[in-house]
Structures are given as structure tokens and as C-alpha cells.
């Protein structure tokens, strides 16, 4: 049987309990006092509204505080300074609304009062692009007659012709040497056609292939951009029949009636062109040109309808019975960059020596278009002017009824 504890030991434990009770009361009272002062972290004060810090504090929760070690007495001293700052921020929140001083520090002070620097760009007048070429007139019914395959060009009752009516814009008072560039086979490739219409200067003349799937639509786009057009004529080339110009070609082995039927089909492919040129697919009609009867009949037919004829064979004489011109240089034969640039330089030399020159490109390939665009950009600085082919047309060597196109 255990003996009861002595009274002296029991009194010691009672004193120890009273001591810890006093410590707990002191800590609890301190926690209540600190809670009334408010939180000490400025970040929490910025979020908490000014009315809630004192009222939102619940009754002291002693057990969590007792579990922590007793804070040293000096901890009461650093609290007032942050609290004072928090109270000032709560009482006067207005100063935070204006632009913070850091914004002023980021913008350099001298800039508002410094004089404006001189302009680095040329004057506005130099930046204005040249005015675009005027659109070409829409097809005039007075300059058309209905044939077996559709409307064909004709001379108007008032003497007007397609040569003048659908010509591209050009100042005929310009005395500089003139260069005309013809680009053939437009309308066969949609990609190349779009690129040529968009990038080539409007002063160049484009040849729409008679075998294009939608030649009238291509012609309309050219007129809207102020570009004059020619119809390509498939004439029997050198090396025929290995070189085949197509089933509507004018051939030496066909009768005059058969060739006339093919010519009517060709001339009715689309309206409002200024003339025709004997080139299709890189073939230039050498054998048909040697067929004098058929070749002269073709020229007379075109002249009677008020349109030009361009002979695609370089270096030959101008057409003798039609308004027109012969090509001086084929610029893309062969179609390499160095050769194209060399032949364009040859075109310039001919223009300076004779006053005008006519170049021909067989197709609007990306390389040809790139070279033509780059070359044409510097013509003015070299004392030359780009002109549509109508500005280079010559009167027939053997005049007939009409003396000049109207």
C-alpha cells in the first residue's frame, strides 16, 4: 500500500501551478493587447479596410499562443512605427491615386523641352508615288462587228480605231528615247499572269494567248490597270510540225479560206486590244512569214480592222501593209539572268542610237518579271522612257486607204 505524499510536496506543486497560471494570464493579456494594436505587416494593412482591424479581431485564443515560446518583452517597441505608417496610409489614401513618382523618373526630363530634331526622311512631296496610269476604255460596240465566232474589231464609222481607243497612257511630247517591252503568253498560267499584272509597269504591253482559258477576264484586268494588250497569233513556225503552234494556227499548207476562218476565231477571243503579234509559246511564225501571199493578206486584214501588227521576228523590216513594228531584241532567249540583263542593255543601246527600241519576252516567268521590274526602275536615271507599243507604231510602207490610225 502506497504512502500519501507529504503535505510539503503537495504545497510545492500548488505553487508551481499558480505560477504557470499567472504566466498564461500574462501571455493571454499580451495577445489581446497586441491584437488591439492591429497587425504589424504593412502588406496586410494595405488589403484590410480601415474599419475592420479592431472590430474583426475575435476574443483571445489562448491555447495557440501558449504553445509558442514566450516573446521577449522588447517586442512591444518596434510595433508602433509600422502601425503608425499603416494608420497614415488608411487615413489618407488619396496620395496613392496620382501618377507615382517612378513614372516621372522613367521619362527623361530634357525631352519635353528639347527642340525637335531635323527630319531624317525626304520631303513629303518626294514620297508621293507617281499617279497610276488611267484605265483603258471599255470595249466600244461602235468598234466591233459580229463574226462567226463573236465580236471582232473594226474601224468605226467616224474613223476611230482600236489603236488609239485602247492605247496605254503616254506623253507623246516626251523627247527621250523610247523603249517598249512586250511580254507574251499571258493568261496560260494563273500564277504568272497574276504576278505580271501586279508587278510589271503599266507602260509595258502584254500579249494574251488565244489559248488562255479566260482571255476576256484577263483583258479586263489589264484595262483596269491601264495596260494595253495584244492578241497572240499562232503562225506556222520554223521546224513545223515538230514545233506545233496549235489547232487554230495559220499554216502555209492551208487555203486562204481556211486561214481566214482561223483568223476570225483568233480575233474574236476577247475585245479591246490594240493589235496582234505573231508569237505563241515561244514560236514566232518564221515559215508563215516566208509565205508572202498569206503574210501580206494577214497584214491587210488587220489594217482594215484598225489594229496593229507586230512582227515577232527580231531585226526584220517593219510590216509593209499594216500599222506596226518589228521586234528589235528577244530579251529572254536564253532565259538566264545574265543573258536577260545583257539583252536589255542591248535594247537601251538601240533606243539611244535610233530613238526607239522594241523588246520581246516570250513568257512572264518569275525570273523574267524580276529582271524587267529591276531594269525598268532605273530607266529615268539613264535618260530613257518606257512606252507602250502603240507609241512606237509606224505607218505602213505601202499606204492604202487610211493614212493614219484615229
Image: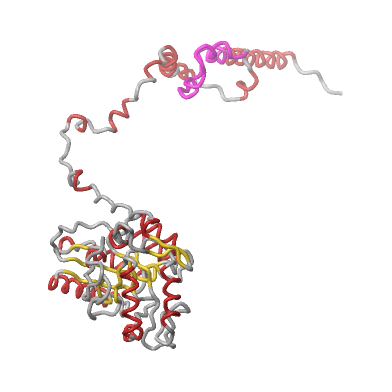
Residue 228 as seen in the image, left or right of residue 126: right
Q: Is residue 61 above or below residue 101?
A: above
13 or 359, which is in the foreground? 359
Q: Is residue 127 above or below residue 367?
A: above
Residue 182 at x, y percent in the picture: 30, 69
| Picture quadrant of residue 12 | top right
**For the N terminus, which image quadrant?**
top right
Q: Which residues are magenta?
A: 30-58
Q: Residue, x 30% and y 72% (percent of image)?
A: 309
Residue 2 at x, y percent in the picture: 83, 23
Residue 35 as seen in the image, left or right of residue 10: left
Q: Is residue 260 above or below residue 78?
A: below
Secondary structure mostly seen in the magenta stretch: helix
Residue 375 at x, y percent in the picture: 24, 66
Residue 179 at x, y percent in the picture: 21, 67
**How many numbered marks appear?**
0
Q: Is residue 53 on the magenta stretch?
A: yes
Asked if residue 202 shows in the view, the reply is no
| Picture quadrant of residue 5 | top right
Amino acid at each position: 500500500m502506497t504512502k500519501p505524499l507529504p503535505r510539503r510536496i503537495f504545497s510545492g506543486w500548488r505553487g508551481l501551478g499558480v505560477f504557470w497560471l499567472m504566466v498564461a494570464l500574462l501571455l493571454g493579456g499580451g495577445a489581446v493587447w497586441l491584437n488591439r494594436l492591429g497587425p504589424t505587416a504593412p502588406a496586410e494593412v494595405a488589403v484590410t479596410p480601415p474599419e475592420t482591424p479592431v472590430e474583426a479581431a475575435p476574443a483571445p485564443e489562448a491555447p495557440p499562443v501558449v504553445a509558442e515560446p514566450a516573446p521577449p518583452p522588447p517586442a512591444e517597441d518596434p510595433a508602433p512605427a509600422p502601425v503608425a505608417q499603416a494608420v497614415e496610409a488608411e487615413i489618407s489614401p488619396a496620395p496613392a491615386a496620382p501618377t507615382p513618382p517612378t513614372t516621372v523618373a522613367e521619362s527623361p526630363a530634357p525631352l519635353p523641352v528639347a527642340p525637335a530634331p531635323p527630319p531624317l526622311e525626304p520631303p513629303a512631296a518626294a514620297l508621293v508615288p507617281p499617279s497610276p496610269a488611267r484605265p483603258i476604255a471599255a470595249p466600244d460596240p461602235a468598234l466591233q462587228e459580229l463574226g462567226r465566232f463573236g465580236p471582232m474589231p473594226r474601224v468605226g464609222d467616224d474613223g476611230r480605231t482600236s489603236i488609239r481607243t485602247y492605247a496605254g497612257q503616254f506623253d507623246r511630247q516626251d523627247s527621250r528615247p523610247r523603249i517598249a517591252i512586250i511580254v507574251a503568253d499571258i493568261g496560260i498560267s494563273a500564277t504568272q499572269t497574276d504576278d505580271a499584272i501586279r508587278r510589271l509597269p503599266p507602260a509595258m504591253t502584254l500579249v494574251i494567248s488565244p489559248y488562255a482559258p479566260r482571255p476576256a477576264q484577263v483583258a479586263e484586268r489589264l484595262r483596269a490597270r491601264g495596260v494595253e494588250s495584244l492578241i497572240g497569233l499562232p503562225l506556222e513556225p520554223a521546224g513545223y510540225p515538230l514545233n506545233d503552234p496549235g489547232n487554230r494556227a495559220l499554216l502555209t499548207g492551208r487555203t486562204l479560206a481556211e486561214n481566214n476562218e482561223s483568223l476570225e476565231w483568233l480575233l474574236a477571243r476577247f475585245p479591246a486590244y490594240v493589235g496582234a503579234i505573231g508569237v505563241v509559246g515561244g514560236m514566232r511564225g518564221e515559215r508563215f512569214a516566208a509565205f508572202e501571199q498569206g503574210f501580206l493578206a494577214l497584214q491587210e486584214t488587220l489594217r482594215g480592222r484598225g489594229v496593229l501588227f507586230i512582227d515577232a521576228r527580231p531585226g526584220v523590216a517593219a510590216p509593209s501593209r499594216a500599222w506596226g513594228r518589228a521586234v528589235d531584241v528577244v530579251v529572254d532567249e536564253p532565259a538566264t539572268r545574265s543573258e536577260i540583263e545583257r539583252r536589255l542593255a542591248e535594247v537601251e543601246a538601240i533606243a539611244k542610237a535610233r530613238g526607239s527600241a522594241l523588246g520581246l519576252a516570250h513568257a512572264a516567268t518569275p525570273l523574267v518579271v524580276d529582271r524587267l521590274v529591276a531594269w525598268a526602275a532605273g530607266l529615268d536615271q539613264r535618260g530613257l522612257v518606257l512606252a507602250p507599243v502603240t507609241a512606237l507604231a509606224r505607218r505602213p510602207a505601202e499606204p492604202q486607204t487610211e493614212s493614219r490610225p484615229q
